[in-house]
Image (spheres, grey):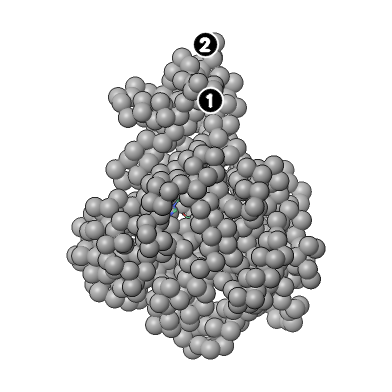
Amino acid sequence: MSVDEALPGFVPWPSEFAQRYRALGYWTGVDLYADFAASAARHPQRTALVCGERRWRYAELARDAERVAVGLRALGLGPRDRVLVQLPNVAEFYLAVLALLRIGALPVFALPAHRRAELAYFVEHTQARAAIVADMEAGCDHRALLRDVAAAQPCLREIVVVGDAQELRPFASLYGDGSLPPPPDASEVAFLQLSGGSTGVPKLIPRSHDDYLYSVRESARICGLGPESVYLCALPAAHNFPMSSPGALGVFHAGGCVVLARSAEPAACFALIERERATLTALVPALALAWLESRQRARYDLSSLRVLQVGGAHLAEDVARRIPDAFGCRLQQVFGMAEGLVNYTRNEDAEELAYISQGRPISAADEIRVVDDEDRDVAPGEVGHLLTRGPYTIRGYYRAPAHNTQAFTADGYYRTGDRVRRLPGGHLQVVGRAKDQINRGGEKIAAAEVESHLLAHPGVFDAALVAMPDRWLGEKACAWVVARETAAPSARELQRFLRERGIAAYKLPDRIEFLDRLPRTAVGKVDKRALQARALGPLTGTVPPTP
Ligand code: OOB
């Protein structure tokens, strides 16, 4: 099948680029499930997955994934059908994803924190036919959530539940026996990943088998993974970092073992590292700091750890320098994005680079430009906007043609929204951000998305969300609100209002402050810098409880 006939709403690479990536051996025509199956065939008896007391050898994981694939087919799911996947770190996450990949259906990855507003949007925007969710997680009944979503979205016909399914379909009932259809073409979209975003509605990222597998293979190689690698997955498994940088897919590719942590809480993870002799794990800076500060550290044997990866948000240099001694392992910085480009500091780099840089790109074919506001290249070593294009960086968001004209240059570079400096050896330093986003401990909040929810309140005339510094999370969100004189809501009321709109808790502003009017720049835009500066000063508004 040619790419032109592919999923509507997917922006393919121009054919000359696709041809080059194939000719160079980056895109191999192997689909993601086939890569996993090949690894399973090489290492059938090795442990592939550990989830609590449950363990799967490769042969068992492949067999179970294929049985689930049979069950999904029996539900009428097939090539290009979108399936919402919202699961915590449980084995069924990988079983579901591998099975969907096998039949050519597209997982749409939601994070466990997402709530009705986000899930309804994903289902509606992708016209998802099915959802695979947990029963209860962190006090939230996902069955009830999905019933609500399904009531408003007739496309959603199947709700599969891991655990107590009530009247819905139990995940356990999917295991079937039978034959499977041919695998999908590797040029096809494999899944839709979530963007951190900076606009009113979240954007979805279509990743193809070819492009994603290339990044997975190279990541596994760069990170030195092999059958002896034991990866502790402490971040939400659906995020791009623990999925493919090198993440679980990199570990499966290499024949290693993935150990799932149900929470990233230090003591629980330390216990798992000790018990499973984990060699590698990945954290966001906020968690790295929490692990560093934890008194529990001394009580566990963490000597198996060889590398601690940190990425997803700015890692303070002083924190970076403490990591090797504290954990008896190397620090690897990872600067990546679900849209594609991933940078790693390397084992062979001068040690200093792991403290002061966020790494260099995976591929020699990753094209990097650092530009000024007019898209002109800045002088070497100067700070500018990072633009990138390459064999695993998308050319467009899914079904977002208007936004794509802004998020990509005419010649296909993705505007990352990050401000970087390029060091002489090609390593990048991330020095800031131009996109209107708050990076709350690695969780990305699109300011415009929360602002539009605030503006939906009848008592809100204007609203702006900005970052404020936080010792633990790096950044927190502060909402500046101009209330209507007649119906001014309190901060608490607004917080409740946002909650009721069904948004993820991490998007709730940590502070809500009131103003008579928002400061504006000369061209009339909201002056977010001024608001950010003001958020550093003493604040008067109610501090809502931190979620
Ligand atoms: C990862 O992916 P996303 O899609 O959640 O977020 C991407 C954005 C980047 O554009 C940048 O703004 C920020 O997150 N970021 C970092 C960073 N890593 C990501 N900012 C400063 N330093 C870093 N090391 O976050 C992601 C995907 C794959 C691997 C690692 C992280």
Identify the residue under disc 1. Answer: 525
Q: Is residue 161 above or below residue 466?
A: below
Q: Position of residue 212 (x, y in %)?
A: 58, 67
Residue pictured at 47% horizontal, 26% vertical: 527
Q: Is residue 53 above or below residue 497?
A: below
Q: Secondary structure at mark 2?
A: loop
Report the quarter where the C terminus lies. top left
Mark drawn on residue 420: none
Identify the residue under disc 2. Answer: 485
- In the displayed structure image, the side of residue 40 where residue 379 appears, left or right: left
Which residue is at the front of the view, 379 or 131? 379
* Visible residue check, residue 531: yes
Q: Position of residue 246 (x, y in %)?
A: 46, 69
- In the displayed structure image, the side of residue 328 where residue 32 appears, left or right: right
Q: Are marks 1 and 2 in contact (CB under 8 Å)?
A: no
Crowding around mark 1 (Cα neighbors within 10 Å: few <14, some 14 to 19, many 20+) is: few
Q: Is residue 517 above or below residue 430?
A: above
Q: Position of residue 285 (x, y in %)?
A: 35, 53
Report the quarter where the N terminus lies. bottom right
Which residue is at the front of the view, 89 or 148? 89
In the rendered structure, which amino acid carries the disc numbered 1? Lys
Residue pictured at 48% horizontal, 50% vertical: 370
Q: Residue furthest top?
A: 486
Residue pictured at 25% horizontal, 74% vertical: 303
In the rendered structure, which amino acid carries the disc numbered 2? Glu
